[in-house]
Amino acid sequence: MAKLLYIEASPRKDRSHSIQVAHAFIDTYKTSNPDDEIETLDLWSIDLPSFDNKTINAKYAVLHGDTHTQEEADAWKIIVTHAENFKSADKYLLSIPMWNFGIPYKLKHYIDVITQPGLTFSFTPEEGFSGLVNNKPATVIFSRGGEYAPGTPTEAFDFQKPSILGWLGFIGFTSINSLEIEPTLAPPEAVESTIEENCSKAANIAKSF
Ligand SMILES: Cc1cc2nc3c(=O)[nH]c(=O)nc-3n(C[C@H](O)[C@H](O)[C@H](O)COP(=O)(O)O)c2cc1C
């Protein structure tokens, strides 16, 4: 039995385009994999630790091979819990709205918490950086009000998709599917057909994910 971790980054729930398409993925996934566990991580309903001075000191202590103070050890323990939960999955689904050309701050906070040496990546001066989340597939559903496809005048403003694909690559992912739902600020009939098309693409990916 495999575990699918679904990370939800929009607070709009019933009105969210990215969540609607993610649900189409999950419905098909459940049919194809009835025994799998699906964990939903709603980033708007969990408490993440502040990534503050003591936590940064704890991170650098790990990078430099130093021993943690008690305060750093306490802070690091919480970080490890979040990173280990992330790593406990076999497959990943993320649904992500574009906010101010990037990602919602809750997702950035989560990334800051779980992107850690010895947990999701490693570093040695000799070998540099290596991702530690290996051989696991991810599907990422991006939604955005405007259009950022290659060749559009706003392509260069897309700091959402490149940053997420870059981050996933950094921590070890090599098999990533992505869907872009855009432009969601178009007239309702056009949005409806974009959503329908992306739900069908998501279901197709889910069949053999
Ligand atoms: C705070 C905020 C900032 C946004 N910034 C952008 C933006 O920079 N570019 C854009 O194309 N759309 C922007 N949008 C529109 C959303 O990307 C769009 O509505 C998307 O469908 C949201 O996904 P969701 O429906 O899953 O929440 C923004 C929306 C919000 C709420």
Image (spheres, rainbow, N blue to C red):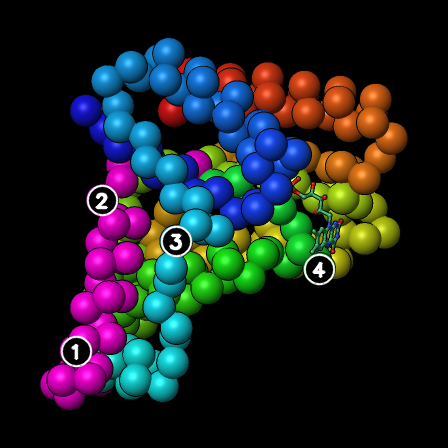
**Which residue is painted at 78% across and 28% down in the image?**
191
**Which residue is painted at 34% across and 52% down in the image?**
172
Q: Is residue 2 left or right of residue 188?
A: left
Is mark 4 in CB contact (under 8 Å) with mark 2? no
For label 3, the crowd category at 10 Å Cα-Cα, with few meaning under 14, some 14 to 19 and many 20 or more, is: few
Q: CB at mark 4 closer than 8 A to ligand 1?
A: yes
- Disc 2 element: loop
Give the CA distance from mark 4 to mark 2: 31 Å
- Mark nearer the N terminus (1 vs 4): 1
Write down the region rendered in magenta: 64-93
Relative image position of residue 120 (x, y in whole percent): 29, 59
**Residue at image mark 2:** 88
Q: Is residue 92 magenta?
A: yes
Is mark 3 in CB contact (under 8 Å) with mark 4? no
Indicate the amino acid at tag 4: Asn
- Disc 3 element: loop
- Mark nearer the N terminus (3 vs 1): 3
Give the CA distance from mark 3 to mark 4: 23 Å
